[in-house]
Amino acid sequence: MNALSRDITFADLQRAITTQAYPDLLEQLVGLSRSTFGFYPASFAYTISYPWIVSRLNNLPPGSHLLDIGAGVSPVPLFLAKHSIRVDCVDNSKHIRTLPPTEGWNEWGFLDYGTLHPNLTSYHCDITSFSPKTKFDAIYSIAALAHMPRIVREKALQLCRNWLQPGGSLFLILDTIPSTDFIWNRSEGVEIEAPIQHGTIDDVANQLRKAGFRMDEFRVMRSIFKSRTDLLFIVCAAMSVSK
């Protein structure tokens, strides 16, 4: 399949392969994305975020059941499915993607992943309207929670705690406004709410603690090449509920 114009450039990919922490995973994800969708997202941040998520999920036992919040058009669910992991993909995008890809495609949109692999199931709905059939071994979200209004994001975090198996893990990547602690407050170029209302990384940390999570990793990556945002990486474990 020929790469679409949204595809990462050769120069940017080579830079990523030589500088990022998981070059082998990156190359696998790029190949899978190009063969399936015709492109790997041009934003350099995805050379960091996709391999980071996969590096943490790829060692889960075969048959593990995961939830992807805001899946979009991404090689990550398909990569996991090919490694015997089941993934429920939830996305409420107004952009409906139906294969084969066209020139207008990018990483945003709702895609029925079930047409690509039997380990994948897609749900076209808001995450706060989603009703899972079972609890999950892990939940992850790549750059989606920042694009939700604060009240929706906070409700989603509480739901994540309710939906996880005892001892389950939550893996999040959120965009932040560069050189600040404010969560990125725009979606498809439109401001969601003012930065002070949208919240800070400390607000997210406090909400996770309140929801019943223990944070094992919480860090911001600054000054990302060709990126209009910084990235917040979070790894949490669902704490036991005291009786």
Image: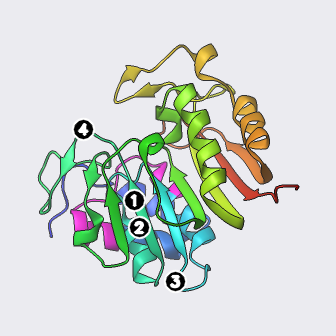
Name which of mark 2 and mark 3 comes first in the sequence: 3
| Rendered view: 185 above or below 18 | above
Instruction: Tell me if mark 3 has few (under 14), some (14-19) or many (20+) residues whose alpha carbon lies within 10 angstroms of its own.
Output: some
Which residue position holds label 3? 63
Q: Report which residue position mark 2 lands on.
A: 77
The verdict on residue 220 being magenta is: no
Circle 1 Cα neighbour tier, 10 Å, few/some/many (<14 / 14–19 / ≥20): many
Q: Is residue 27 visible?
A: no
Name the element at disc 1: strand
Q: What is the CA distance from the residue labelled 2 to the residue labelled 1?
A: 8 Å
Q: Secondary structure at mark 2?
A: helix
Q: From the image, state whether disc 2 or disc 1 is nearer to you.
A: 1
Q: Identify residue type, mark 2.
A: Pro
Depth order, front residue of 158/105: 158
Q: Are marks 2 and 1 in contact (CB under 8 Å)?
A: yes
Q: Position of residue 175 (x, y in %)?
A: 55, 38
Question: Which callout, 1 or 4, points at the residue further toward the start of the chain?
Answer: 1
Measured from the top left, where is residue 141 in percent x and y? 52, 52
Q: Quadrant of residue 94?
A: top left
Query: Looking at the picture, which amino acid does disc 3 mark?
Result: Gly
| Separation of marks 1 and 4 at Cα, in angstroms | 15 Å
**What range is drawn magenta here?**
31-49
Mark pair 3, 4: CA separation: 31 Å
What residue is pinned by disc 4? 94
**Residue assigned mark 1:** 89
Mark 3 and mark 1 residues within 8 Å of each other at the beta carbon: no
* Rendered location of residue 157, percent (x, y): 62, 43
Asked if the residue at tag 3 contacts the one at tag 2, i.e. Cβ–Cβ closer than 8 Å, the answer is no
